[in-house]
Image (tube, grey):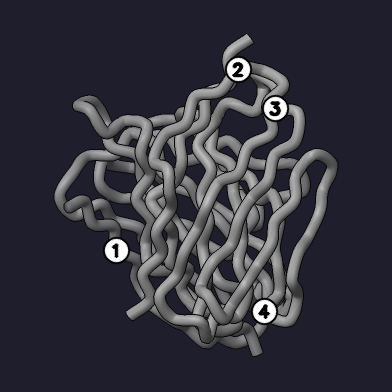
Amino acid sequence: KQEVTQIPAALSVPEGENLVLNCSFTDSAIYNLQWFRQDPGKGLTSLLLIQSSQREQTSGRLNASLDKSSGRSTLYIAASQPGDSATYLCAAPMGAGNMLTFGGGTRLMVKP
Amino acid sequence: GAVVSQHPSWVICKSGTSVKIECRSLDFQATTMFWYRQFPKQSLMLMATSNEGSKATYEQGVEKDKFLINHASLTLSTLTVTSAHPEDSSFYICSARPSGGSRTDTQYFGPGTRLTVL
């Protein structure tokens, strides 16, 4: 059974800092790994998807890496802004169309 | 812990038929439920936000007349794919957000429903 863990559970940083969110998974036979953002009371917003054959994906100030052998993924946020405050979730399916297993999320607060 | 179920787990139907997917929060009440869709090799995409007793809010590009959402009670939301076509084949996931208490910022996800339209 796949287990996905995110550390830290909560993070508070001053505006402008670069930060790293961590995601670990127990079964390396993942199909892909996805990072989501969740604002309070809202649905998930997909940020980045890394296929199992890829090492990283970039979108704007966001960079996600994937190391299947070690069972880890990181989400790097450069020059953080107050608008980045949200809960960040990583999730991995075991195969195409399979159920996503989500991590517990990291609640990020960026202070002005 | 909070459990969300979906029924059916998978369904195969003929083109032109309608399919109903149920999302239930088993041990908590949920004023708000979310419906997501995931195509192969793509990320999960929010389709709509379902609010108990009111009309659902659809994301841009999602046809509300094709994907009918009914949130008739605090523990049940349904998604009906009307006149399904092969391009509607996808993985549909719901999530539920508890009403009140200390868990209102948390969403609990169902296991998903795989729809295949022939």
Q: Along the polypeptide, which appears first: circle 4 or circle 2?
A: 2
| Along the line of sight, the residue nearer the viewer: A103 or B41 | A103
Which numbered circle lies on residue B27?
Answer: none
Residue at the location (60% across, 82% down)? A96
Determine the CA span between mark 1 and mark 4: 28 Å
Q: Which residue is mark 4?
A: A52
Q: Which mark is residue A80?
A: 3
Q: Are marks 1 and 2 in contact (CB under 8 Å)?
A: no
Residue at figure coordinates x 29%, y 57% from the top left: B4
What secondary structure is found at the residue carrying circle 3? loop
Mark 1–mark 2 Cα distance, whole angstroms, equals 40 Å
Give the mark nearer the N terminus: 2 vs 3. Answer: 2
Q: Give me the residue at 45% from left, 70% from top.
A: A25
Q: Is residue B47 visible?
A: yes
For the residues labelled 3 and 1, the Cα–Cα distance comes to 37 Å
Residue B89, by quadrant, is: bottom right
Instruction: Sort mark 1 into few (<14), some (14-19) or many (20+) by Cα contacts within 10 Å.
Output: many
- As measured in the structure, the alpha-carbon distance from the residue carrying label 4 to the one carrying label 3 is 27 Å
Q: CA distance from mark 2 to mark 3?
A: 8 Å
The residue nearer to you, when weighing A37 against B52, is A37
Between tags 1 and 2, which lies in front? 2
Secondary structure beneath dot 1 equals strand
Same chain for mark 2 and mark 3? The answer is: yes
Q: Earlier in the sequence, mark 4 or mark 3?
A: 4
Q: Which residue is mark 2?
A: A14
Frontmost of labels 1 and 4 is 4
- Residue where numbered disc 1 is placed: B5
User: Is residue A55 found left or right of A42 in the rendered image?
Assistant: right
Does residue B76 sit above or below A29 in this rendering?
above
